[in-house]
Amino acid sequence: MRKSAEIFQEASKLMVGGGCAGGRIHAALGTPFYIDHADGSHVFHVDGEEFIDYHCGAGALLFGWNHPRIREAIIKCVDKGFFMNFDSPATLEFARLFKELVPTVEKIRLTNSGTEATLAAIRAARAYTKKNLIIKMDGHFHGMHEMIWFNGGCGSDLDKYGQTRSVTPATPGFPAGAEKNVKLIEFNNLDAVKHVFETYRGDIAAIIMEPVNYDCGCVPSTREYMKQVRELCTKEGILLIFDEVISGLRFRPGSAQGYYGIKPDLSTFAKAIANGFSLALVGGKAEIMELFNPTGPVICSGTSSGNLMSVMAAIECLKMAMEPGFYDQVEKIEKNLCGELNALFGKHGIPGHIRSQGAQFAFYFGYDDPQMDYILSETVKHYHPQLYRRFTRECLAEHLYVFDGGEKPFPQHNGFTIAHTEDDIALTISKVD
Ligand code: PLP
Protein backbone atom coordinates (compact mmCIF):
# COMPACT_ATOMS: atom_id res chain seq x y z
CA MET A 1 0.00 0.00 0.00
CA ARG A 2 1.28 3.46 -0.88
CA LYS A 3 2.13 5.64 2.07
CA SER A 4 -0.49 8.24 1.11
CA ALA A 5 -3.21 5.55 1.05
CA GLU A 6 -2.09 4.35 4.47
CA ILE A 7 -2.15 7.87 5.89
CA PHE A 8 -5.58 8.47 4.38
CA GLN A 9 -6.96 5.27 5.85
CA GLU A 10 -5.71 6.05 9.35
CA ALA A 11 -6.30 9.82 9.19
CA SER A 12 -9.91 9.29 8.07
CA LYS A 13 -10.59 7.55 11.39
CA LEU A 14 -9.45 10.62 13.29
CA MET A 15 -9.88 13.60 11.00
CA VAL A 16 -12.89 14.55 8.94
CA GLY A 17 -12.12 13.49 5.38
CA GLY A 18 -8.60 12.54 6.41
CA GLY A 19 -7.39 16.13 6.46
CA CYS A 20 -8.01 19.72 7.47
CA ALA A 21 -10.25 20.98 4.66
CA GLY A 22 -12.66 19.55 2.12
CA GLY A 23 -11.02 21.66 -0.58
CA ARG A 24 -7.77 19.79 -0.09
CA ILE A 25 -9.16 16.54 -1.50
CA HIS A 26 -7.62 16.21 -4.93
CA ALA A 27 -10.19 14.85 -7.39
CA ALA A 28 -7.68 12.63 -9.17
CA LEU A 29 -6.50 11.09 -5.90
CA GLY A 30 -9.65 11.14 -3.82
CA THR A 31 -7.46 12.03 -0.85
CA PRO A 32 -5.67 15.12 0.36
CA PHE A 33 -2.37 15.71 -1.39
CA TYR A 34 -0.16 14.57 1.51
CA ILE A 35 3.17 16.35 1.46
CA ASP A 36 6.34 15.41 3.28
CA HIS A 37 8.31 18.59 2.70
CA ALA A 38 8.72 21.49 0.32
CA ASP A 39 11.56 23.56 -1.03
CA GLY A 40 11.66 26.52 -3.41
CA SER A 41 9.02 25.87 -6.07
CA HIS A 42 8.77 22.13 -5.41
CA VAL A 43 6.69 20.00 -3.05
CA PHE A 44 7.66 16.43 -2.18
CA HIS A 45 4.80 13.98 -1.86
CA VAL A 46 4.83 11.34 0.86
CA ASP A 47 4.97 8.66 -1.85
CA GLY A 48 8.34 10.03 -2.91
CA GLU A 49 7.32 12.00 -5.97
CA GLU A 50 8.35 15.59 -6.62
CA PHE A 51 5.98 18.19 -8.08
CA ILE A 52 6.37 21.73 -9.35
CA ASP A 53 3.88 23.60 -7.23
CA TYR A 54 1.46 26.02 -8.87
CA HIS A 55 -1.02 26.14 -6.04
CA CYS A 56 1.53 27.83 -3.77
CA GLY A 57 -0.38 27.69 -0.53
CA ALA A 58 -3.67 28.93 -2.03
CA GLY A 59 -2.01 32.21 -2.86
CA ALA A 60 -0.05 32.47 0.37
CA LEU A 61 3.37 31.94 -1.15
CA LEU A 62 5.15 34.65 -3.05
CA PHE A 63 8.72 33.87 -2.01
CA GLY A 64 8.74 30.08 -2.37
CA TRP A 65 8.95 27.31 0.20
CA ASN A 66 11.75 27.24 2.74
CA HIS A 67 13.13 30.61 1.67
CA PRO A 68 16.60 31.03 3.24
CA ARG A 69 15.89 34.51 4.61
CA ILE A 70 12.59 33.47 6.14
CA ARG A 71 14.19 30.32 7.50
CA GLU A 72 16.89 32.43 9.15
CA ALA A 73 14.24 34.68 10.69
CA ILE A 74 12.47 31.65 12.12
CA ILE A 75 15.69 30.33 13.63
CA LYS A 76 16.26 33.74 15.26
CA CYS A 77 12.73 33.59 16.60
CA VAL A 78 13.37 30.16 18.11
CA ASP A 79 16.40 31.63 19.87
CA LYS A 80 14.16 34.32 21.33
CA GLY A 81 11.81 31.74 22.81
CA PHE A 82 9.17 31.87 20.01
CA PHE A 83 6.66 33.51 22.30
CA MET A 84 3.19 34.76 21.53
CA ASN A 85 0.77 37.03 23.33
CA PHE A 86 3.39 39.71 23.86
CA ASP A 87 4.18 42.58 21.56
CA SER A 88 7.80 43.29 20.82
CA PRO A 89 10.21 45.48 18.84
CA ALA A 90 9.52 43.11 15.93
CA THR A 91 5.83 44.06 15.93
CA LEU A 92 6.83 47.73 15.71
CA GLU A 93 9.30 47.04 12.91
CA PHE A 94 6.63 45.18 10.99
CA ALA A 95 4.11 48.02 11.45
CA ARG A 96 6.63 50.63 10.27
CA LEU A 97 7.56 48.64 7.17
CA PHE A 98 3.95 47.89 6.38
CA LYS A 99 2.91 51.52 6.54
CA GLU A 100 5.82 52.46 4.33
CA LEU A 101 4.62 49.93 1.79
CA VAL A 102 0.87 50.61 2.10
CA PRO A 103 0.43 54.22 3.18
CA THR A 104 -3.40 54.12 3.48
CA VAL A 105 -2.89 51.82 6.43
CA GLU A 106 -2.34 54.54 9.02
CA LYS A 107 -2.87 52.09 11.85
CA ILE A 108 -3.09 48.33 11.95
CA ARG A 109 -4.39 45.50 14.11
CA LEU A 110 -2.84 42.08 13.59
CA THR A 111 -4.89 38.90 13.43
CA ASN A 112 -4.09 35.28 12.57
CA SER A 113 -6.13 34.78 9.43
CA GLY A 114 -7.79 36.64 6.63
CA THR A 115 -11.14 35.50 7.96
CA GLU A 116 -10.54 37.26 11.27
CA ALA A 117 -9.27 40.36 9.50
CA THR A 118 -12.39 40.81 7.33
CA LEU A 119 -14.59 40.09 10.33
CA ALA A 120 -12.83 42.84 12.27
CA ALA A 121 -13.00 45.25 9.32
CA ILE A 122 -16.75 44.78 8.94
CA ARG A 123 -17.27 45.09 12.68
CA ALA A 124 -15.31 48.36 12.74
CA ALA A 125 -17.20 49.66 9.70
CA ARG A 126 -20.54 49.08 11.39
CA ALA A 127 -19.35 50.61 14.65
CA TYR A 128 -17.92 53.67 12.87
CA THR A 129 -20.86 54.39 10.58
CA LYS A 130 -23.52 53.12 13.02
CA LYS A 131 -25.14 51.50 10.00
CA ASN A 132 -25.82 47.87 9.27
CA LEU A 133 -25.78 46.84 5.63
CA ILE A 134 -22.68 45.52 3.90
CA ILE A 135 -22.48 45.46 0.10
CA LYS A 136 -20.67 42.45 -1.28
CA MET A 137 -19.63 41.49 -4.81
CA ASP A 138 -21.03 38.26 -6.20
CA GLY A 139 -18.31 35.59 -6.25
CA HIS A 140 -15.87 37.46 -4.01
CA PHE A 141 -14.62 35.58 -0.98
CA HIS A 142 -13.76 37.19 2.33
CA GLY A 143 -13.43 34.24 4.69
CA MET A 144 -15.78 31.73 6.22
CA HIS A 145 -17.79 33.80 8.67
CA GLU A 146 -21.46 34.61 9.05
CA MET A 147 -20.92 38.33 8.44
CA ILE A 148 -20.07 37.93 4.80
CA TRP A 149 -19.84 34.36 3.46
CA PHE A 150 -22.71 34.54 1.02
CA ASN A 151 -22.48 33.63 -2.67
CA GLY A 152 -18.75 33.57 -2.83
CA GLY A 153 -15.68 31.41 -2.97
CA CYS A 154 -14.59 28.13 -1.51
CA GLY A 155 -17.38 25.63 -1.96
CA SER A 156 -20.36 27.91 -1.53
CA ASP A 157 -23.64 27.50 -3.38
CA LEU A 158 -22.18 27.02 -6.83
CA ASP A 159 -25.32 26.73 -8.92
CA LYS A 160 -26.20 30.26 -8.03
CA TYR A 161 -23.11 31.93 -9.44
CA GLY A 162 -23.93 34.66 -11.83
CA GLN A 163 -27.57 33.65 -12.03
CA THR A 164 -29.14 35.36 -9.12
CA ARG A 165 -28.63 38.36 -6.94
CA SER A 166 -30.31 36.64 -4.00
CA VAL A 167 -28.10 36.37 -0.94
CA THR A 168 -27.55 32.74 0.02
CA PRO A 169 -25.45 31.51 2.96
CA ALA A 170 -22.45 29.61 1.69
CA THR A 171 -22.97 26.83 4.20
CA PRO A 172 -25.71 25.47 6.44
CA GLY A 173 -25.46 26.56 10.03
CA PHE A 174 -25.79 30.33 9.66
CA PRO A 175 -28.08 32.08 12.12
CA ALA A 176 -31.51 32.70 10.60
CA GLY A 177 -31.66 36.08 8.94
CA ALA A 178 -27.89 36.57 8.66
CA GLU A 179 -28.34 37.22 4.95
CA LYS A 180 -30.50 40.28 5.66
CA ASN A 181 -27.36 42.20 6.60
CA VAL A 182 -25.73 41.82 3.20
CA LYS A 183 -26.69 43.00 -0.28
CA LEU A 184 -25.10 41.45 -3.29
CA ILE A 185 -24.10 43.11 -6.53
CA GLU A 186 -22.13 42.20 -9.62
CA PHE A 187 -18.46 43.19 -9.67
CA ASN A 188 -17.37 45.68 -12.32
CA ASN A 189 -20.93 46.90 -12.83
CA LEU A 190 -21.10 50.54 -11.81
CA ASP A 191 -24.85 50.79 -12.35
CA ALA A 192 -25.28 48.04 -9.75
CA VAL A 193 -23.31 50.11 -7.23
CA LYS A 194 -25.37 53.22 -7.94
CA HIS A 195 -28.60 51.27 -7.74
CA VAL A 196 -27.84 49.59 -4.42
CA PHE A 197 -26.57 52.85 -2.87
CA GLU A 198 -29.77 54.58 -3.91
CA THR A 199 -32.09 51.79 -2.81
CA TYR A 200 -30.58 51.45 0.66
CA ARG A 201 -29.47 55.05 1.21
CA GLY A 202 -28.83 55.70 4.89
CA ASP A 203 -28.49 52.01 5.84
CA ILE A 204 -25.14 51.05 4.30
CA ALA A 205 -22.00 50.78 6.43
CA ALA A 206 -19.51 49.56 3.83
CA ILE A 207 -18.83 48.00 0.49
CA ILE A 208 -16.22 45.24 0.47
CA MET A 209 -14.41 43.80 -2.53
CA GLU A 210 -11.32 41.96 -3.65
CA PRO A 211 -9.68 44.56 -5.91
CA VAL A 212 -8.79 41.65 -8.16
CA ASN A 213 -11.31 38.84 -7.77
CA TYR A 214 -9.02 35.83 -7.49
CA ASP A 215 -11.65 33.67 -5.92
CA CYS A 216 -13.29 33.32 -9.33
CA GLY A 217 -10.05 32.97 -11.27
CA CYS A 218 -8.25 36.22 -11.98
CA VAL A 219 -10.81 38.95 -12.55
CA PRO A 220 -9.35 42.44 -12.52
CA SER A 221 -11.25 45.64 -12.47
CA THR A 222 -10.73 48.90 -14.32
CA ARG A 223 -9.22 52.03 -12.82
CA GLU A 224 -12.35 53.88 -13.86
CA TYR A 225 -14.65 51.50 -11.97
CA MET A 226 -12.49 51.70 -8.85
CA LYS A 227 -12.32 55.50 -9.07
CA GLN A 228 -16.07 55.83 -9.45
CA VAL A 229 -16.77 53.44 -6.58
CA ARG A 230 -14.38 55.43 -4.39
CA GLU A 231 -16.10 58.70 -5.29
CA LEU A 232 -19.56 57.30 -4.68
CA CYS A 233 -18.53 55.91 -1.29
CA THR A 234 -17.08 59.25 -0.22
CA LYS A 235 -20.18 61.10 -1.38
CA GLU A 236 -22.54 58.73 0.44
CA GLY A 237 -20.47 58.31 3.63
CA ILE A 238 -20.04 54.58 2.97
CA LEU A 239 -16.72 52.95 3.86
CA LEU A 240 -14.73 51.25 1.12
CA ILE A 241 -13.04 48.05 2.29
CA PHE A 242 -10.45 46.39 0.07
CA ASP A 243 -9.88 42.74 0.86
CA GLU A 244 -6.24 42.36 -0.15
CA VAL A 245 -5.84 38.96 1.50
CA ILE A 246 -4.62 37.56 -1.82
CA SER A 247 -3.64 40.71 -3.73
CA GLY A 248 -1.61 42.10 -0.81
CA LEU A 249 2.09 42.43 -1.64
CA ARG A 250 1.52 41.02 -5.13
CA PHE A 251 1.40 44.41 -6.85
CA ARG A 252 3.62 47.42 -6.89
CA PRO A 253 3.51 49.94 -5.41
CA GLY A 254 1.97 48.76 -2.17
CA SER A 255 -0.48 46.06 -3.26
CA ALA A 256 -3.55 46.38 -5.51
CA GLN A 257 -4.67 49.67 -3.97
CA GLY A 258 -1.37 51.26 -4.99
CA TYR A 259 -1.61 49.73 -8.45
CA TYR A 260 -5.13 51.10 -8.95
CA GLY A 261 -4.31 54.37 -7.19
CA ILE A 262 -7.29 54.05 -4.85
CA LYS A 263 -7.38 54.79 -1.13
CA PRO A 264 -9.75 52.44 0.66
CA ASP A 265 -10.88 53.38 4.16
CA LEU A 266 -10.00 49.95 5.51
CA SER A 267 -8.03 47.06 4.03
CA THR A 268 -7.33 43.51 5.02
CA PHE A 269 -4.16 41.54 4.30
CA ALA A 270 -2.93 37.99 4.94
CA LYS A 271 -1.26 35.17 2.98
CA ALA A 272 1.79 36.63 1.16
CA ILE A 273 2.57 39.23 3.83
CA ALA A 274 4.16 36.43 5.86
CA ASN A 275 4.58 33.94 2.98
CA GLY A 276 1.98 31.68 4.52
CA PHE A 277 2.75 32.03 8.21
CA SER A 278 -0.38 32.77 10.24
CA LEU A 279 -0.44 36.52 10.06
CA ALA A 280 -3.13 38.84 8.83
CA LEU A 281 -4.16 42.39 9.51
CA VAL A 282 -6.86 44.96 9.23
CA GLY A 283 -5.65 48.49 8.70
CA GLY A 284 -6.78 51.88 7.53
CA LYS A 285 -7.66 55.39 8.59
CA ALA A 286 -6.54 56.07 12.15
CA GLU A 287 -9.90 57.58 13.01
CA ILE A 288 -11.64 54.27 12.25
CA MET A 289 -8.90 51.99 13.56
CA GLU A 290 -8.88 53.73 16.92
CA LEU A 291 -12.31 52.33 17.53
CA PHE A 292 -10.57 49.02 18.30
CA ASN A 293 -9.72 48.18 21.87
CA PRO A 294 -8.03 49.54 23.96
CA THR A 295 -8.48 53.02 22.44
CA GLY A 296 -12.09 52.24 21.51
CA PRO A 297 -14.88 49.82 22.34
CA VAL A 298 -14.65 47.45 19.35
CA ILE A 299 -13.03 44.17 20.29
CA CYS A 300 -10.51 42.50 18.02
CA SER A 301 -7.84 40.32 19.61
CA GLY A 302 -6.64 36.73 19.70
CA THR A 303 -4.25 34.58 21.72
CA SER A 304 -1.69 34.24 18.97
CA SER A 305 -2.42 37.44 17.03
CA GLY A 306 0.88 39.00 16.00
CA ASN A 307 2.84 35.98 17.24
CA LEU A 308 6.56 36.50 16.99
CA MET A 309 7.27 33.76 14.48
CA SER A 310 4.80 35.07 11.90
CA VAL A 311 5.86 38.66 12.48
CA MET A 312 9.55 37.84 12.04
CA ALA A 313 8.80 35.91 8.86
CA ALA A 314 6.70 38.83 7.62
CA ILE A 315 9.45 41.39 8.23
CA GLU A 316 11.69 39.47 5.83
CA CYS A 317 8.87 39.25 3.28
CA LEU A 318 8.26 43.00 3.40
CA LYS A 319 11.97 43.76 3.13
CA MET A 320 12.32 41.47 0.12
CA ALA A 321 9.30 43.03 -1.58
CA MET A 322 10.84 46.48 -1.05
CA GLU A 323 14.12 45.57 -2.69
CA PRO A 324 14.74 47.03 -6.14
CA GLY A 325 14.05 44.54 -8.88
CA PHE A 326 11.69 42.33 -6.88
CA TYR A 327 8.58 43.11 -8.93
CA ASP A 328 10.61 43.12 -12.16
CA GLN A 329 11.40 39.51 -11.36
CA VAL A 330 7.74 38.70 -10.59
CA GLU A 331 6.64 40.28 -13.86
CA LYS A 332 9.37 38.49 -15.82
CA ILE A 333 8.24 35.09 -14.53
CA GLU A 334 4.62 35.98 -15.23
CA LYS A 335 5.43 37.01 -18.79
CA ASN A 336 7.39 33.84 -19.50
CA LEU A 337 5.15 31.34 -17.78
CA CYS A 338 1.73 32.76 -18.53
CA GLY A 339 2.65 34.03 -22.00
CA GLU A 340 3.86 30.60 -23.05
CA LEU A 341 0.95 28.77 -21.45
CA ASN A 342 -1.43 31.09 -23.24
CA ALA A 343 0.19 30.35 -26.60
CA LEU A 344 -0.49 26.63 -26.09
CA PHE A 345 -4.25 27.16 -26.33
CA GLY A 346 -3.82 28.56 -29.85
CA LYS A 347 -1.23 25.97 -30.82
CA HIS A 348 -3.57 23.10 -29.95
CA GLY A 349 -6.78 24.77 -31.12
CA ILE A 350 -8.30 24.64 -27.64
CA PRO A 351 -10.70 27.47 -26.90
CA GLY A 352 -9.42 29.24 -23.85
CA HIS A 353 -6.83 31.58 -22.47
CA ILE A 354 -4.77 32.37 -19.43
CA ARG A 355 -5.41 35.43 -17.36
CA SER A 356 -2.72 36.55 -14.98
CA GLN A 357 -1.99 39.39 -12.60
CA GLY A 358 0.05 39.73 -9.44
CA ALA A 359 1.80 36.33 -9.61
CA GLN A 360 -1.58 34.59 -9.83
CA PHE A 361 -3.09 33.09 -12.95
CA ALA A 362 -6.11 31.10 -14.02
CA PHE A 363 -6.92 28.81 -16.92
CA TYR A 364 -10.04 29.96 -18.72
CA PHE A 365 -11.06 26.83 -20.61
CA GLY A 366 -13.94 27.21 -23.01
CA TYR A 367 -13.67 30.70 -24.48
CA ASP A 368 -11.06 33.17 -25.52
CA ASP A 369 -12.60 36.57 -25.04
CA PRO A 370 -10.60 38.04 -22.15
CA GLN A 371 -13.10 40.90 -21.77
CA MET A 372 -15.74 38.41 -20.69
CA ASP A 373 -13.87 37.73 -17.48
CA TYR A 374 -14.84 41.09 -16.15
CA ILE A 375 -18.42 40.00 -15.64
CA LEU A 376 -18.78 36.72 -13.78
CA SER A 377 -22.20 35.82 -15.15
CA GLU A 378 -20.72 35.82 -18.67
CA THR A 379 -17.75 33.72 -17.57
CA VAL A 380 -19.89 30.99 -16.01
CA LYS A 381 -21.93 30.71 -19.21
CA HIS A 382 -18.85 29.85 -21.26
CA TYR A 383 -16.34 28.31 -18.89
CA HIS A 384 -15.71 24.57 -19.19
CA PRO A 385 -15.04 23.10 -15.70
CA GLN A 386 -14.87 19.46 -16.84
CA LEU A 387 -12.08 20.29 -19.24
CA TYR A 388 -10.20 22.08 -16.50
CA ARG A 389 -10.56 19.09 -14.21
CA ARG A 390 -9.27 16.79 -16.93
CA PHE A 391 -6.36 19.15 -17.38
CA THR A 392 -5.48 19.18 -13.65
CA ARG A 393 -5.48 15.37 -13.61
CA GLU A 394 -3.11 15.28 -16.55
CA CYS A 395 -0.91 17.86 -14.85
CA LEU A 396 -0.74 15.71 -11.74
CA ALA A 397 0.37 12.74 -13.82
CA GLU A 398 3.11 15.01 -15.22
CA HIS A 399 4.18 16.12 -11.74
CA LEU A 400 2.72 19.58 -11.96
CA TYR A 401 0.55 20.45 -8.98
CA VAL A 402 -2.21 22.68 -10.34
CA PHE A 403 -5.20 23.38 -8.10
CA ASP A 404 -8.09 21.07 -8.87
CA GLY A 405 -10.94 23.05 -7.29
CA GLY A 406 -13.68 20.45 -7.70
CA GLU A 407 -15.42 21.45 -10.93
CA LYS A 408 -16.50 24.87 -9.83
CA PRO A 409 -18.28 26.74 -12.62
CA PHE A 410 -15.59 29.40 -12.84
CA PRO A 411 -11.79 29.33 -13.12
CA GLN A 412 -9.55 28.60 -10.15
CA HIS A 413 -6.57 30.71 -9.23
CA ASN A 414 -3.11 29.23 -9.32
CA GLY A 415 0.15 31.01 -8.75
CA PHE A 416 3.90 31.06 -8.90
CA THR A 417 6.63 32.39 -6.63
CA ILE A 418 9.94 34.11 -7.17
CA ALA A 419 11.48 30.69 -6.51
CA HIS A 420 10.10 29.35 -9.82
CA THR A 421 13.12 29.04 -12.06
CA GLU A 422 13.51 29.23 -15.83
CA ASP A 423 14.02 25.45 -15.78
CA ASP A 424 10.73 25.00 -13.91
CA ILE A 425 8.97 27.10 -16.51
CA ALA A 426 10.55 25.33 -19.48
CA LEU A 427 9.66 21.93 -18.00
CA THR A 428 6.12 23.07 -17.25
CA ILE A 429 5.58 24.37 -20.77
CA SER A 430 6.86 21.18 -22.37
CA LYS A 431 4.66 19.04 -20.13
CA VAL A 432 1.54 21.12 -20.70
CA ASP A 433 2.29 21.12 -24.43
N1 PLP B 1 -10.22 37.04 1.73
C1 PLP B 1 -9.79 36.52 0.57
C2 PLP B 1 -9.79 37.38 -0.66
C3 PLP B 1 -9.33 35.20 0.51
O1 PLP B 1 -8.94 34.68 -0.63
C4 PLP B 1 -9.33 34.43 1.71
C5 PLP B 1 -8.84 33.04 1.69
O2 PLP B 1 -8.58 32.43 0.70
C6 PLP B 1 -9.79 35.02 2.89
C7 PLP B 1 -10.22 36.33 2.87
C8 PLP B 1 -9.77 34.24 4.16
O3 PLP B 1 -8.46 34.13 4.59
P1 PLP B 1 -8.00 32.93 5.56
O4 PLP B 1 -8.07 31.67 4.77
O5 PLP B 1 -6.61 33.33 5.96
O6 PLP B 1 -8.92 32.94 6.72
Image (tube, grey):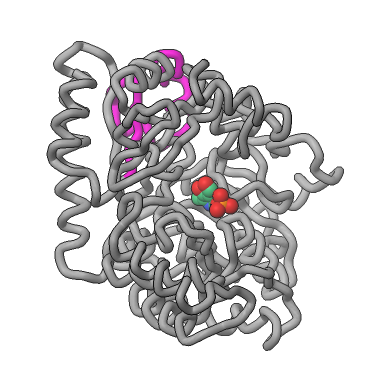
Seen in the image, is 341 located left or right of residue 153?
Answer: left
Q: Is residue 62 above or below residue 10?
A: below
Q: Extreme front residue here?
A: 1
Task: Please tell me how many numbered marks the rendered image carries.
Answer: 0
Q: Residue at x 55, y 24 (%)?
A: 31
Residue 292, quarter of picture: bottom right
Q: Quadrant of the C terminus?
A: top left
Nearer to us in this view, 94 or 34: 34
Nearer to us in this view, 143 or 404: 404
Q: Which residues are magenta?
A: 360-387
Residue 108: x and y, percent? 53, 76
Residue 256, quarter of picture: bottom left
Residue 188: x and y, percent? 44, 45
Q: Extreme right residue here?
A: 176
Seen in the image, is 3 located left or right of residue 37?
Answer: right
Q: Is residue 377 magenta?
A: yes
Residue 178: x and y, percent? 79, 48
Q: Is residue 327 above or below residue 396?
A: below
Q: Residue at x 64, y 30 (%)?
A: 18
Q: Is residue 72 magenta?
A: no
Seen in the image, is 373 located left or right of residue 429?
Answer: right
Q: Residue at x 17, y 28 (%)?
A: 427
Q: Is residue 194 visible?
A: no
Q: Is residue 47 visible?
A: yes
Q: Residue at x 24, y 51 (%)?
A: 418
Nearer to us in this view, 428 or 140: 428
Residue 111: x and y, percent? 59, 67
